[in-house]
Image (cartoon, rainbow, N blue to C red):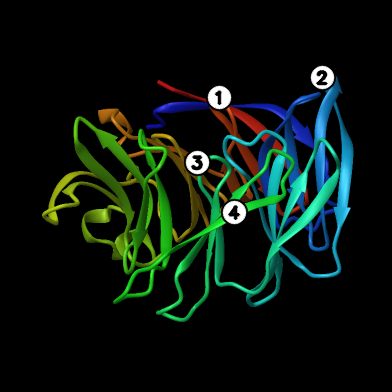
Amino acid sequence: MTEGVLMLSHTLKAPAGGSLVDVCCVSWLSVGVCVAVAGEWEVCVWGQTNPPHWRRLHTWTFIESVMSVFPVPDAPGLLCVTLGQLEIREARVLCCSSLSQCCVRGRSRWWWACPTEGWFSSSYSVATTPLQVYTLTQDGRLHGCLSLVCPTERVRTVAAVEGQTDALIGSTDTLCLRGYSLCGVLFVLLQHPSLCAVEEEEGGALFSLVATNPLTGTVALATRLGLPEACTGRLLEVDVHGSSVVGVFRSGSVCVWQLGRRQGQEGAWFPELGCQLARWGVQGTVLTAHLNGDVCLHRYRPL
């Protein structure tokens, strides 16, 4: 049984020409909430200057293939785009207000934006290379850089900590999606090691929320997130916003989990959406990208 409602509000017809790579929401101060769509060679921003109609506001074109696009938290109007093919060759900051772009760094293994003064970080694949954490100005220019060193192991992913704006979690093995600070306890949302079929996971659970003490290393399981019995198949990717998790499956179906809601531990399942990507937007908005090139905006409401 689906424990939530996903209502279609708008459809952008093939806004990137049908070659979708990534999609996200971005705040443009003079327009409001906009949708950034990445195609193979471009990133375009769509907005409602004349609601309810959407139109393309600006397009940035690149000579390198686009790999991903995501907003810089707490920095309205700033987007980060990664360029390359098998590896990221460079990352650029796109500024909606000035329609400018700034190259921040060259070749790296991944990029990620964190909600602390517009910081984001990159990492090379060499184990001894430190993480590079960058601070940006409001117009997307590089302001400063800080190196974080993990002396013994390679950090594979970095996650934000809700409630602690100056804290980051680096994970070296299991994929860490998000951290939560509550009453002196650090809760960490983990994705099981492989994006494999549901029946291959222990107990059918795909994610675990654990409570940990960073000083002593003590860990205790808080809860697991599973799936409705009718949902099977391979999980392709996940997006987290606050305490909300959305996952996309190879079948094109979507599942939404709400941490802290007991009935949400098995997820709200929405079959046959036919999407290849799903991203959280603002205020419960879910963006879905489809094989025909369309981008759909939905409103999600848990029951």
The residue that mark 2 highlights is 52
As drawn, the label of residue 249 is none
Q: First in sequence, mark 4 or 3: give its number.
A: 3
Mark 1 element type: loop
- Circle 4 crowding by C-alpha within 10 Å: few under 14, some 14–19, many from 20: few
State which tag comes first along the sequence, 1 or 3.
3
Query: What is the number of the mark on residue 283?
Result: 1
Quickly name the residue at label 4.
144
Q: On the image, which quarter does residue 65 sit in? A: bottom right
From the viewer's perspective, is residue 228 above or below residue 112? Answer: above
- Quarter holding the C terminus is top left
Q: Using the image, tell me which numbered label, if any, was put on residue 116.
A: 3
* Few, some or many residues within 10 Å of mark 2 (<14, 14–19, 20+): few
Which mark is nearer the camera, 2 or 3? 3
Q: Residue 173, percent across and down?
A: 32, 69
Cα separation, mark 1 vs mark 4, equals 31 Å
Q: CA distance from mark 4 to mark 3?
A: 13 Å
Q: Are marks 4 and 3 in contact (CB under 8 Å)?
A: no
Residue 94 percent coordinates (x, y): 76, 48
Separation of marks 1 and 3 at Cα, in angstroms: 20 Å
- Residue 64 lies, with reference to residue 192, above or below; the image says below
The answer to which of marks 2 and 3 sits earlier in the sequence is 2
Name the residue at 58% across, 45% down. Answer: 278
Depth check, front residue: 43 or 152: 152
Q: Amino acid at mark 1?
A: Gln
Q: Is residue 58 left or right of residue 127?
A: right
Give the mark nearer the N terminus: 1 vs 4. 4
Q: CA distance from mark 4 to mark 2?
A: 40 Å
Residue at 41% of width from left, 68% of height from top?
A: 156
